[in-house]
Amino acid sequence: MVTVLLPGPLRGEAGGASRLSVTAAAGTLRAVLDELAASHPRLSRRIRDERGELRRYVNVFVDGEDCRHSGGLATPVGDGAEVQVLPSVAGG
């Protein structure tokens, strides 16, 4: 089981949940997000673009490591891992 942690701005797309559990049998971040898309398509559209790539303004961490520095969507995700999704915040 993998736990996906969602911040407040994304919870509305997941029925208000702050945590979602997925099985992600394939063991990659892509597999986790694919499973998430099957059950929460609106949430998926906020995380990935129409090509299935991570949106530029969304940061995803697997067990505290930024996935952009550890393989992107091919980042290994083991059983019991935590995946945290954080949209970037802009302002001045």
Image (tube, grey):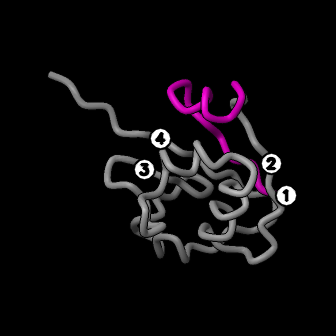
For the residues labelled 1 and 3, the Cα–Cα distance comes to: 21 Å
| C-alpha gap between disc 3 and disc 4 | 5 Å
Query: Considering only order in the chain, which callout, 4 or 3, is on the residue closer to the N terminus?
Result: 3
Q: CA separation, marks 2 and 4?
A: 17 Å
User: How many numbered badges does the structure rendering display?
Assistant: 4
**What span is colored magenta in the figure?**
1-16
x, y percent for residue 86: 47, 41
Residue 83 numbered tag: none
Instruction: Describe the element under mark 1 as helix, strand or loop.
Output: loop
Is residue 8 in the magenta section? yes
Callout 2 secondary element: strand
Is 42 inside the magenta-drawn segment? no
Kindly identify which numbered label has been placed on residue 59: 3
- The x, y position of residue 33, in whole percent, is 63, 60
Numbered disc 3: secondary structure: strand
- Tell whether 87 sits left or right of 76: left
Check disc 4 and give the amino acid type: Leu
Q: Are marks 3 and 4 in contact (CB under 8 Å)?
A: yes
Residue reaching furthest to the left: 92
Residue drawn where x is 62% and y is 55% of the image: 63
Going from N to C along the chain, the mark reached first, 1 or 2, is 1
Pointers 1 and 4 in contact (C-beta within 8 Å): no
Identify the residue under disc 1: 1
